[in-house]
């Protein structure tokens, strides 16, 4: 290895283009599949010095007027060397970044860019920039200073021009994603100064090949009015997913701030495209699901009022209609959520984006809420099993309400609570008080009532089975329970009080040992700690009232 590098360096140092080309091509072929860099400490240090020297020489060559084959070989070498974080020093400088940016055709007045660039050279330079930016903070800083994002935005504007290959477009997008993911200032610059949402929406439109029958209604060009869309090609899907990821970065705070009328129109335009993405399929189920996942993540960033575009398309033959509204997109989102729910692993990362999106859509759109309630919480018939038992979608979501991950159980409970119009009694009816207690305690609703919300008044029609069983349903478990014998039957009041005080003493001991913390419901409906003396007082008060009641009845 060391001899090989020394030999290559010697040929590079001659300055002869042909000799350098032969040496670099041999090295590149040998190391093309090398991604792991482990060696002994001393060997690693010496090897690192040789790689840095080779990197400096290759950069020096790239400043010369070279034939494209030699440019390509130099860039391939940089790409291979830049996989090793220990060999990045020569490439992370401002000067090195300028050289690579120029060869990628992204220069902003720095150096000369060929009028008709060699596309293979451009792609290789972009790959180098992706590696270096990903692995080096210094390179990220230099890229920001050199306005690399402005050059990328300028080329994104050419999204409908035919001279750029798929590889150029893809690595432009990959580099843009890395910059916006790693640099907050670059993300803000693209979002505001460079009007990133409009720019990327146009790129997504061009990538998928859309036409606009109406202001916020999208169709595939050449397939307007068709009930089934053709599969989205592999290359188009890859570019679309990169655009979706960049848009996620630049819209990260959009749903947490107020947007003006112009911004709202921009987001609605984007939302219409995203609706088309969620309704589209690609080559292979895995690729389709990945694209849908990125689409759902991005939809969750849009300002909530702009989600109305999901319901705007006209009802057509084959559409799912509810209350006169096209529910195709909502149904796809629900099926996507249920599929993720069925897998059961990494729920926080995979399930919550779609669950949150459905929750907020239901909260703000009456038709969406009623449609989802019909699908998730149909009129209750099964009153013999606990709400968490079974394979219906309601059962699966109720099971999540006691999940070990706090975020997962909160989101599951919030979804069902919204479908119940934030009515405590209806929520308990479908989930059982035991499952509902966590959300009710957090909301200060342990005493019942309803959270303030903007919900229409619609009837919660009970089935005959539910009406018959209702008096026998245990509200804690949410099912009909068999009658249990009264354990205190035959005991005197003194014996009952004695047993109660034993229980109080046990609570007191466990509380003092900090095993448990007794709680009570405060005046605000929220849980608050209960001191041992309060527990004793409540027990004595209860039995005092019982004794007085018995005395009164005896007197009468």
Image (cartoon, helix red, strand yellow):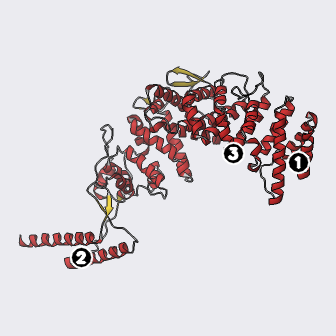
Residue at 44% across, 26% down? 261
Looking at marks 2 and 1 on the same chain, the residue that comes earlier in the sequence is marked by: 1
Badge number at residue 5: 1
**Location of residue 200 by image quarter:** top right
Q: Position of residue 484 (x, y in %)?
A: 31, 68
Return the mark for residue 341.
Answer: none
Say which label, 2 or 3, has the lower sequence index: 3
Q: Is residue 30 above or below residue 485?
A: above
Kindly report which numbered mark, 2 or 1, lies closer to the viewer in this rendering: 1
Along the line of sight, the residue nearer the viewer: 107 or 274: 107
Precedes in sequence: disc 1 or disc 3: 1
Residue under circle 3? 136
Tell whether label 3 touches label 2 (CB within 8 Å). Answer: no
| Badge 3 density bin: few <14, some 14–19, many ≥20, Cα 10 Å | some
| Residue 323 percent location from the top left of the image | 39, 31
Circle 2 residue:
496
**Position in image of residue 20 (x %, y %):** 90, 38
In this orientation, does residue 488 appear?
yes
């Amino acid at each position: 290895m060391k001899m090989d590098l020394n030999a290559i360096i010697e040929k590079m140092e001659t300055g002869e283009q042909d000799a350098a080309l032969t040496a670099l091509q041999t090295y590149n072929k040998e190391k093309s599949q090398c991604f792991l860099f482990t060696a002994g400490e001393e060997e690693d240090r010496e090897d690192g010095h040789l790689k840095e020297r080779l990197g400096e020489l290759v950069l020096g060559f790239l400043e010369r007027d070279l034939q494209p084959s030699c440019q390509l070989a130099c860039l391939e070498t940089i790409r291979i060397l830049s996989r090793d974080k220990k060999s990045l020093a020569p490439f992370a400088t401002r000067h090195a970044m300028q050289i690579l940016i120029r060869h990628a055709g992204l220069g902003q007045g720095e150096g000369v860019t060929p009028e008709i660039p060699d596309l293979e050279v451009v792609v290789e330079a972009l790959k180098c920039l992706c590696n270096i930016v990903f692995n080096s903070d210094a390179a990220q800083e230099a890229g920001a200073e050199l306005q690399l994002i402005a050059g990328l935005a300028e080329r994104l504007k050419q999204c409908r021009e035919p001279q750029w290959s798929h590889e150029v477009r893809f690595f432009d997008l990959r580099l843009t994603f890395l910059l916006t993911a790693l640099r907050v200032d670059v993300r803000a610059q693209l979002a505001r100064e460079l009007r990133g949402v409009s720019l990327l929406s146009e790129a997504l439109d061009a990538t998928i090949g859309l036409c606009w029958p109406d202001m916020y209604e999208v169709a595939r060009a050449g397939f307007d009015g068709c009930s089934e869309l053709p599969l989205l090609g592999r290359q188009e899907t890859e570019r679309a997913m990169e655009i979706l990821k960049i848009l996620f970065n630049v819209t990260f705070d959009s749903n947490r701030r107020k947007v003006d009328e112009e911004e709202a129109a921009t987001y609605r335009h984007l939302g219409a495209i995203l609706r088309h993405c969620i309704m589209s399929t690609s080559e292979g189920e895995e690729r389709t699901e990945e694209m849908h996942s990125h689409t759902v993540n991005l939809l969750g960033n849009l300002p909530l009022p702009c989600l109305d575009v999901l319901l705007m398309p006209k009802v057509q033959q084959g559409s799912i209609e509810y209350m006169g509204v096209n529910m195709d997109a909502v149904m796809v989102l629900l099926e996507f959520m249920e599929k993720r729910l069925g897998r059961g692993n990494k729920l926080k990362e995979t399930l919550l984006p779609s669950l949150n999106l459905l929750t907020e859509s239901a909260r703000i759109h009456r038709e969406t809420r009623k449609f989802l309630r019909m699908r998730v919480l149909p009129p209750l018939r099964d009153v013999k099993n606990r709400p968490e038992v079974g394979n219906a979608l309601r059962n699966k979501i109720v099971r999540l309400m006691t999940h070990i991950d706090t975020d997962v159980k909160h989101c599951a409970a919030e979804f069902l609570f919204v479908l119940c119009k934030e009515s405590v009694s209806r929520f308990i009816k479908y989930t059982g008080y035991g499952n509902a207690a966590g959300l009710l305690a957090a909301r200060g609703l342990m005493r019942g009532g309803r959270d303030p919300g903007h919900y229409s008044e619609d009837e919660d029609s009970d089935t005959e089975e539910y009406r018959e069983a209702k008096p026998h349903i245990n509200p804690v478990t949410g099912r009909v329970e068999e009658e249990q014998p009264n354990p205190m039957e035959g005991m005197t009041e003194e014996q009952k009080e004695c047993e109660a005080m034993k229980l109080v003493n046990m609570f007191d001991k466990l509380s003092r040992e900090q095993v448990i913390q007794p709680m009570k419901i405060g005046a605000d409906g929220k849980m608050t700690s209960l001191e041992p003396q309060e527990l004793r007082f409540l027990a004595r008060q209860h039995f005092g009232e019982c004794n007085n009641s018995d005395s009164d009845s005896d007197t009468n």
